[in-house]
Amino acid sequence: MSIGAQTISITAAALGGLAAGLLYDLLRQIRAVGGRTAGFLCDLFFCLFCTAELFLVGMLFCEGRLGVWEPAGFLTAFGLYLFGISPSVTPVFGIYREKMLVILKKVRKNVK
């Protein structure tokens, strides 16, 4: 792999890590109001998203082989988002927590 291809692959993985951080913040709000089942589903969706993102980076940008640097870039960007950006973004998502609670209550009524 050329240096340019390596740069593109680690950048794609890092962008995926930032997207995973944003998704984590969104799902955190649902987990806070949703209960155990919603928490399980959010965790499952998050794990599937992260796995799919790294798989796609490996297939699309790394010629089908995922190296050490791509997951490292993903985890670094995810960590930087969680500890750097998330504290300022989480209150914005908190505004919608009550709206999500109303929606989840309606869903629970329909399921029962």
Image (cartoon, rainbow, N blue to C red):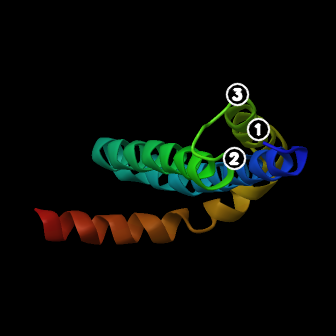
User: Which residue is label 1 attached to?
Assistant: 73
**Residue 18, image x, y percentages:** 72, 51
| 70 over 19 or under it: above or below | above
Marks 1 and 2 sit apart, C-alpha to C-alpha, by: 7 Å
Mark 1 vs mark 2, foreground winner is 1
User: Which residue is label 3 attached to?
Assistant: 68
Camera-side residue of 106 and 74: 74
Q: Quadrant of residue 6?
A: top right
Task: Tell me: 99 left or right of 104.
Answer: right
Quarter the C terminus occupies = bottom left
> At 16% from the left edge and 71% from the top edge, which residue is drawn?
110
Quarter the N terminus occupies = top right
SS class of the residue under badge 2? helix
Mark 3 vs mark 2, foreground winner is 3
Q: Which class describes the residues within 10 Å of circle 3: few (<14), some (14-19), or many (20+)?
A: few
Camera-side residue of 17 and 90: 17
